[in-house]
Amino acid sequence: MAEFRAFFGARLGRTFADYPALHQASVEERGEFWSALWDYCGVIGEKGTVLLGDDRMPGAAFFPEARFNYAENLLHDADDREAIVFRAEDRVEKRMKRRELLQAVGSAQRFLKSKNVGVGDRVAAMLPNCPEAIVLMLATASLGAIWSSCSPDFGVRGVLDRFSQIEPKLFLCCDGYFYNRQRLSIRDKCAEILDALPSVKASLVIDLIGESKDVASSLVDAVAYSDMMSETSDEPIHFERLAFNHPLFILFSSGTTGIPKCIVHGAGGTLLQHLKEHRLHSNNGENDRVFYFTTLGWMMWNWLVSALACRSTLVLFDGSPFAPRPNVLFDYAQQERVTFFGTSAKYL
């Protein structure tokens, strides 16, 4: 924050005596603030004009000429630094380097393209908090398609109340999951959901309980994730650079007052807001290891993944936070040298 305070002050030809002064300037000089943040964080893309007209809110149009891609900004610097660490309740562990993540996203992108997924198409995911979910989300975003997700513990009605509204072209699911020491298959749930989503043209099944190929063979036009990843190609990954406000995510309201309402998040606003929160508020950078106890049904999963843009390592966990003992998350954080620990108020 101190470094950005000096950076922004130099832009304005001013000095800020304290953080409240910096905050006030960010409110009064909105266009200059977001432009400075773009440059300070090194956003990859074409920035263009910062504001169309004035900055009165609501109604201000920021970065009307910008062309960029969210996934490209998370996958830059594909080196041997650790990108993702994952542990499941059943003690399964996975690790991915940044270059391995980029390669996996490239394979997933080729699969999506083979299913004619492109700009504006919706991809619906019912997945756990695992590396494969991040790979598939980034592949979706790389093409300009729109990602929407929930976790596999959702009931059929809860999934359909959300995904039937967005008419997805592709459905991503898993064969099952572990929770509270139980191995739970969702084969029948996946089939029931697909029967009620006529817009879906193809499906992909990731493996958590060893049944992905069996589940994929039981669904129409479905492929196991491992089979997708076994396909090799020299085709380089492509990042579709799109408008600042191009849709990136579709999230949903809680559904406590009727059917959940769609909440569309644009790529540019999502990236800049998350960069602000990671880089300035949380001080996350390339030497940090960021953990958040979340599922794909909560917006904090989307927030967590954006830490890749800071070259931070993502530390993922899927399962019960109290099995086999109440301090399992804190033990995990200590073992993985977590520098940022996030969870919900209910957990505490």
Image (cartoon, rainbow, N blue to C red):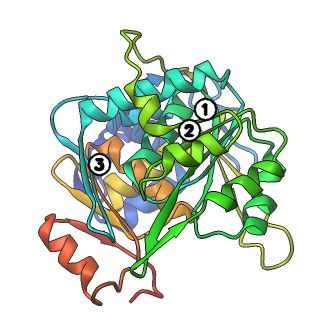
Figure quadrant of the N terminus:
bottom left
Question: Which residue is found at the position 68% from the left and 21% from the top?
Answer: 116
Is 100 placed above or below 347 here? Answer: above
Looking at the image, can residue 8 be seen?
A: no
Give me the disc on residue 87.
Answer: none
| Amino acid type at image mark 1 | Phe
- Neighbours of disc 2 within 10 Å: few (<14), some (14-19), many (20+): many
Is 293 placed above or below 42 here? Answer: below
Cα distance in 3D space between marks 1 and 2: 5 Å
| Amino acid type at image mark 3 | Phe
Furthest residue to the top? 234
Q: Position of residue 270 (x, y in %)?
A: 54, 47
Is 181 placed above or below 189 here? Answer: below
Q: Position of residue 203 (x, y in %)?
A: 64, 39
Side of 347 relative to 255 (left or right): left
| Amino acid type at image mark 2 | Gly
Whichever of callouts 1 and 2 sits on the residue coming sooner in the sequence is: 1
Q: Quadrant of residue 330?
A: bottom left
Question: Which residue is found at the position 29% from the left and 52% from the top?
Answer: 5
Query: Disc 2 designates what residue?
Result: 268
Cα distance in 3D space between marks 3 and 1: 23 Å
Query: Disc 1 designates what residue?
Result: 244
Q: Position of residue 305 (x, y in %)?
A: 41, 50
Q: Are marks 3 and 2 in contact (CB under 8 Å)?
A: no
Q: Are marks 1 and 2 in contact (CB under 8 Å)?
A: yes
Query: Disc 3 designates what residue?
Result: 4
Cα distance in 3D space between marks 3 and 2: 20 Å
Count of numbered badges drawn on the protein: 3
Circle 3: element type: helix
Side of 313 relative to 220 (left or right): left
